[in-house]
Amino acid sequence: MAASRDDDLVARAAAGDVDAFEVLMAARLNRAVRTASAILGREADAHDVVQEAFVATWRHLPKLRDRTRFDPWLNKMIVNGCRDALRRRRRSREVELDGALALQSEDATGAAAGMAALNSAFDRLSVPQRQLLVMHHLHRVPVADLARELGIPEGTAKWRLHAARAALTRALEVDR
């Protein structure tokens, strides 16, 4: 029932119904922000990426051919927005004084040190690796659904998830 309701909302939004679009986006906002935050590591950047993705979604929704693929299409827009944000971040080489001050004020042992190491290791992963780990471990998306959303065979999704975990493990070992 929910899928047919979503299909109806997507069709109405594609036809220019702002209310239908708002309902669609409201239902997806929290997950979109969590995904972008996990990939980018900064909530403020995540909100910017999600806002840009939602605007692009509104603008390009009439061109979406298969309306049943709305969620994977939106997720791809968010991930692509994260890629662009990471590229801009690398180019600007901005210094994060807030983050440095926050780390100095925390106790460097225990959970804070573990989270800092995990965040550092996660930053070294590619965007596709981050996406897989976030979708599977944070959003608890089963491998079969990951494969369907990414348009790849289930075995390939399993292999990529395994490779992403291995890359994260290697990145964590570098910090030790």
Image (tube, grey):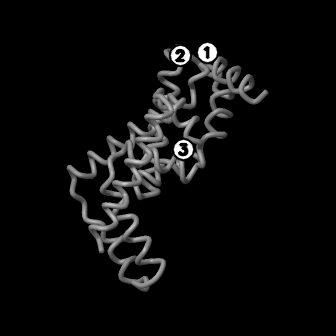
SS category of the residue bearing label 3: helix
Query: In the displayed structure, does residue 21 sit left or right of residue 174?
Result: right
Work out whether mark 2 precedes mark 3 in sequence or the reverse, and give the earlier one. 3
Element type at marker 2? helix
Residue 15 located left or right of residue 33: right
In the image, residue 101 above or below residue 167: below
Among the 4 quarters of the image, the one containing residue 93: bottom left
Cα–Cα span, label 2 and label 1: 7 Å
**Would you say 34 lies left or right of 106 here?**
right
Kind of residue sitting beneath label 2: Pro
Q: Which residue bears the numbered disc 1?
A: 15
> Is there any visible trace of residue 54 in the rendered image?
no
Q: Position of residue 148 (x, y in %)?
A: 54, 29
Residue kind at label 1, given as amino acid type: Ala
Asked if the residue under mark 3 is in contact with the one under mark 1, i.e. CB atoms within 8 Å, the reply is no
Disc 3 marks a residue whose amino acid type is Ala
Residue under label 3:
32
**Above-or-below relation of 65 to 46:** above
